[in-house]
């Protein structure tokens, strides 16, 4: 199959790029499961933008830089913050029913923000955004949505009939879950919008498909990746023996929710930071982790029961319903919470136009390291990044169409030398091992010794997975496992390279902040 542009990923970043391209080019958007399956549909809190009198772009920029511990690229932050109100206006045009109050958009508050500036659709913002983008995409004849297509690898000059080392990308190979075959999809330009790598960790709020596929594919296609050690842990994931990855939005704290010790009822955050529950995520997650380990707890409490029941039900209807079904009435009871992996701040290096190092390859959204988030993403800046960079990548392609690499004939994937696996158990076992040691050794608080332990393990597993991959026919699970190994290795190597504690990377061996903020850049 051949298209003008191939987009890998149907979340906010991928669909925004597609909608901007569609009036001019034929676009295919592939998703590895259903089109709605990415993290976008799961977003709760909202999208940050300066929309209130008294707030300012400067304040949003400063809040982003403070949360990011100065590792952010100020020019990128200024660009994205400045583009936010227009991005929200476009979503309103697409029909996203943002909450209103007194004729204006209602703005909620989240940690690290010095003002109310989060537009939201109650506590299910992402679902509303995803539905609006999908509806708009379905109405565009130039957009072909291809669910159940798992991208395996980017096609470069190495796969061309006339071998080339120019590094240009010409599309990708993808495993079709429907035909169970590897398909060849070519295009003048390819966009990676594959989301994050949260499932490298045992506990994560991210969807099942967040296995860092785009990061691993770009790395194998010789693109640089950056700041992979900056893995964000959300402070408040529901602690429940059956429901493992349900987020309790930061807006609960924004609207007054307090963190308390389940043993004594003490509100402990003021002991750690003057901003208490509204400190940036890294600070709150570390404080909870500290109290849990110090007191041997399973969880801490998040309590919003002091607010009016009507207010709580109106602002958090989905959380209210979900937890009521589990026997927790949040208008009366505190919520047991623990930190869990939430967001991948690092990723494929892109410029302001979403260009990667490889000609013909763009990237947008959580898969990237654009310079916006630095060492710790500020709440609700992620969907914003998807909207701004999804559009920027599309516009750059359209403006530079004739400079994109021309399409040359490529080889089909040769599956004749592999057989069906006779021990699928290897996949589940290896996956489980990685996620557990990443949680224990490369988690919220790190040490060099633990990072070396993790490195030894990933090196060993890489050998096993490479051998397995070479001998057996690919499946969706095997593709993901191969990527998980790659990305876990990138995270560990980045964590070992940073010899300071900054933002999300906290190591007992280098507790101080160095004078100069430097990106961790891995070059293939
Ligand atoms: P996603 O929306 O994750 O989409 C990824 C797409 O890539 C999917 O379509 C997937 O199928 C596809 N894909 C991946 N790999 C492959 C492959 N190999 N082949 C084919 N397709 C592939 N951010 C905010 O700003 N505000 C919030 O309130 C907020 N709340 C959040 C709540 C939760 C529970 C979570 C998990 C995240 C939240 N975030 C929030 C973060 C935000 O939702 C994500 O960063 C953002 O949605 C990422 O969008 P994306 O388009 O980059 O990727
Ligand atoms: C949340 O609602 O707490 C998540 C917001 C975000 O990840 O930006």
Image (spheres, grey):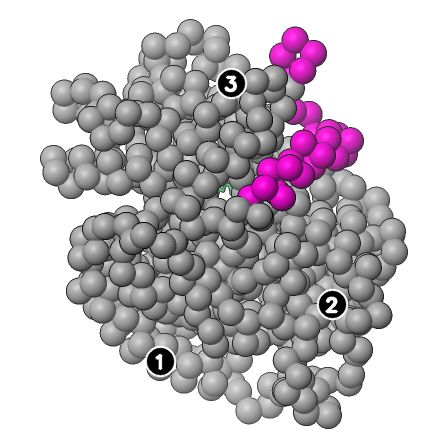
Q: Earlier in the sequence, mark 2 or mark 3?
A: 2
Image quarter for residue 103?
top right
Give residue 273's quadrant in the image: top left
* Picture residue at 51% right of the left edge, 69% below the top: 224
Question: Does residue 208 appear in this view?
Answer: no
Residue 476 in picture, x, y percent from top left: 53, 67
What residue do we see at 48% from left, 8% from top? 310
Dividing the picture into quadrants, the one containing residue 129 is top right
For label 1, the residue is 464
Circle on res. 189: 2
Q: Which residue: 60% across, 38% down? A: 81
For label 1, the SS is: helix
The spot of residue 332 in percent (x, y) is 33, 13
Q: Which residues are magenta?
A: 77-104
Which circle's residue, 2 or 1, is located before the other in the chain? 2
Identify the residue position indicated by label 3 in the image.
315
10 Å neighbourhood of mark 2: few (<14), some, or many (≥20)? Answer: many
Q: Nearer the viewer, residue 257 or 498?
A: 498
Q: Is residue 65 visible?
A: yes
In the rendering, which numbered label is found on residue 293? none
């Amino acid at each position: 199959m051949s298209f003008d542009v191939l987009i890998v990923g149907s979340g906010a970043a991928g669909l925004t790029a597609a909608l901007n391209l569609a009036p001019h080019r034929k676009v295919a958007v592939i998703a590895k499961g259903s089109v709605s399956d990415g993290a976008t549909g799961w977003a709760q809190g909202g999208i940050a933008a300066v929309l209130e009198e008294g707030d300012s772009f400067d304040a949003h920029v400063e809040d982003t830089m403070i949360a990011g511990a100065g590792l952010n690229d100020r020019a990128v932050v200024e660009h994205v913050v400045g583009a936010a109100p227009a991005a929200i206006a476009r979503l309103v045009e697409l029909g996203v029913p943002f909450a209103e109050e007194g004729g204006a958009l209602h703005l909620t508050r989240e940690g690290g923000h010095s003002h109310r500036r989060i537009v939201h659709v109650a506590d299910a913002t992402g679902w509303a955004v995803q539905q609006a983008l999908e509806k708009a995409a379905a109405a565009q004849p130039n957009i072909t949505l291809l669910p159940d297509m798992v991208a395996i690898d980017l096609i470069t000059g190495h796969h061309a009939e006339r071998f080339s080392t120019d590094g240009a990308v010409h599309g990708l190979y993808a495993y079709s879950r429907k035909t169970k075959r590897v398909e060849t999809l070519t295009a003048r330009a390819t966009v990676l919008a594959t989301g994050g790598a949260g499932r490298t960790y045992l506990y994560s709020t991210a969807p099942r498909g967040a296995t860092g596929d785009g990061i691993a594919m770009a790395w194998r296609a010789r693109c640089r990746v950056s700041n992979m050690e900056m893995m964000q842990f959300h402070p408040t994931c529901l602690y429940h023996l059956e429901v493992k990855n349900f987020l309790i939005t930061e807006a609960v704290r924004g609207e007054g929710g307090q963190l308390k010790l389940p043993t004594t009822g003490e509100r402990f955050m003021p002991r750690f930071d003057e901003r208490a529950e509204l400190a940036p995520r890294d600070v709150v997650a570390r404080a909870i982790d500290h109290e849990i380990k110090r007191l041997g707890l399973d969880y801490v409490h998040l309590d919003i029961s002091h607010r009016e029941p009507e207010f709580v039900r109106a602002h958090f209807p989905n959380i209210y319903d979900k937890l009521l079904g589990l026997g927790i009435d949040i208008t009366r009871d505190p919520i047991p919470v623990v930190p869990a992996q939430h967001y991948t701040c690092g990723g494929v290096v892109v410029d302001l136009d979403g260009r990667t190092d490889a000609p013909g390859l763009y990237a947008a959204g959580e898969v990237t390291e654009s310079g916006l988030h630095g060492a710790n993403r500020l709440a609700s800046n992620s969907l914003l990044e998807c909207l701004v960079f999804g559009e920027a990548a599309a516009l750059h392609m359209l403006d530079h169409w004739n400079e994109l690499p021309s399409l040359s004939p490529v080889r089909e994937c040769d599956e004749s030398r592999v057989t069906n696996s006779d021990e699928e158990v290897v996949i589940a076992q290896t996956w489980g091992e990685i996620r557990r040691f990443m949680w224990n050794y490369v988690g919220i608080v790190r040490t060099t010794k633990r990072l070396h332990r993790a490195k030894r393990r990933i090196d060993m597993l890489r050998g096993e997975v490479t051998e397995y991959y070479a001998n057996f026919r690919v499946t969706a699970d095997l593709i993901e496992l191969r990527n998980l190994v790659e990305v876990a290795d990138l995270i560990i190597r980045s964590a070992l390279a940073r010899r300071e504690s900054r933002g999300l990377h906290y190591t007992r061996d280098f507790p101080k902040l160095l004078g100069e903020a430097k990106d961790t850049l891995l070059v293939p």
